[in-house]
Image (cartoon, rainbow, N blue to C red):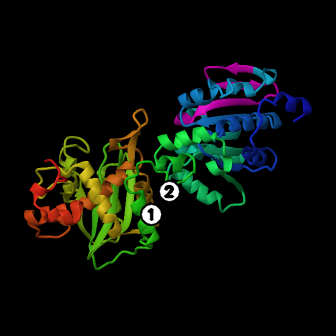
Amino acid sequence: MNVETRIKLDKFKPRDYQLPLLDAILNKGYKRVIGIWPRRAGKDICGWNIIIRAALQRIGTYFYVFPTYSSGRKILWDAINIQGMRVLDYLPNELIESKNEQLMRIRLKNGSSIQVIGSDNYDNSIVGTNPVGIVWSEYAIMDPMAYSFARPILAANDGWSVFLSTPRGKNFFWEMLQIAEHSPEWFVHKLTIEDTNHLSPENWEREKREMSEDLLQQEYYCSFSLGVEGSFYAKYIDRIRINGQIGQVPWEPSFRVNSSWDIGVRDSTSIILYQCVGQVIRIVDCYENNKQGLEHYVEWLSSKPYLYGKHFAPFDIKVKEWGSGITRWEKARQLGIEFHIADSFHDGSKKIGLMDGIEAARSIIPKCWIDEVKCDRLIKCLENYRQEYDSKNKVYKSQPLHNEFSHMADAFRYLALSQPKTKDGMSEEDFNKQWMKVVYGDNSSMPAVFRNDLPNY
């Protein structure tokens, strides 16, 4: 950049903690950079100024990507900073040749172009283009397929990516961080509120009063493990990991393998394979896919060397249809799978409630040994399965958030509820006693008149 350009770009005065990120891209030549900063630490202001300077250094196409197209318009294109200046105005008008409001695209006089796009439309906005630099804003909540499509283009163009985000649990962004932290080709810049001190004492005290501890850990201390707001199972998974119960869990040929299913029509279908060895539940394998017929999943089961015991599915398997004209229950029988209903009482007439099922799942996690390699998807889903948060009323909603982690977590819930049914020859009375013990522990034997925790059926 020449002296004139440096003067024109003097509206942005980076904070001290922002300098290493700018230096990594603009001076040191890193091609892959991760910036994990606390909330309100100026990620997008810094990212926008990185892309401006890069576009002036090297002529090419640059994308600033948000989780959605609409969030890009709100957070950057139409945004105003706390000083009352439009974020776009960090790029001086003297350097602009044209601006397209509808496409959120700016063409510079030197021949470069910068465009704000959304990862929700990556197949139209990225595929077939030729970017040399991309900034990804709040990457942890994006569609990760967007980067998968952009990656080979950037490699061919000797291009770069900057991933800016706060954590959202141990998802694909966390996996990327594990790779980056052990590779000299990546630059990782992870900070907490104690590193940045970017809030005034008054604002920081207000944030601590109004936010839960989980959310504070996620948003201001950039925690991947503590910051899964409202997680149902994360702390239980952390405990068994510390106890060494997540690792290599080989299949025991002398015990039958049971399967627990969450079956989707348009959504994902998830299967968990497990063995009951005494009081221990050995989870040896799992599988998830979508938009596949039941035949696909039966074929997957058949490809495994296991001797199968019982197969469990949710209550609604007899109601919803898999395909044309017959229920999934009937279709499964035709393919050789005899399903048992996991989330019902022994007579099959009553469905066990969702929250009771979640409580049953919590109670069995300490008994579980989970294969870390074959069941990595299950572990990730259990760590990220959480309640939906009502930001307006600052309370958790009663129902879990339905997202990519829900289906495998549901299959685990059915696994928990199936435990009393894995034994043959059990009477209805024995089953109901065992189920109540799974959910309510030692209180299950207390007379109902003295209890207030019984479900209403």
Q: Which residue is mark 1?
A: 238
- Specify few, some or many for label 1: CA neighbours under 10 Å numbering under 14, 14-19, or 20 or more: some
Residue 342 position by quadrant: bottom left
Residue 327 lies, in percent from the top left, at 19, 46
157 vs 101, left or right, is right
Magenta region, residue range = 98-122
386 vs 169, left or right, is left
Seen from the viewer's position, the closer of residues 289 and 133 is 133
The structure residue drawn at horizontal position 20% and vertical position 50%, both measured from the top left corner, is: 315
- Tell me if label 1 and label 2 are in contact, CB under 8 Å: yes
Residue 225 is labelled as 2
Q: In the image, is residue 106 part of the stretch drawn in magenta?
A: yes
8 vs 333, left or right, is right
Of the numbered discs 1 and 2, the one sitting upstream in the chain is 2
The structure residue drawn at horizontal position 64% and vertical position 19%, both measured from the top left corner, is: 101
Residue 412 lies, in percent from the top left, at 32, 58
Give how far apart the Cα atoms at labels 1 and 2 are. Answer: 8 Å
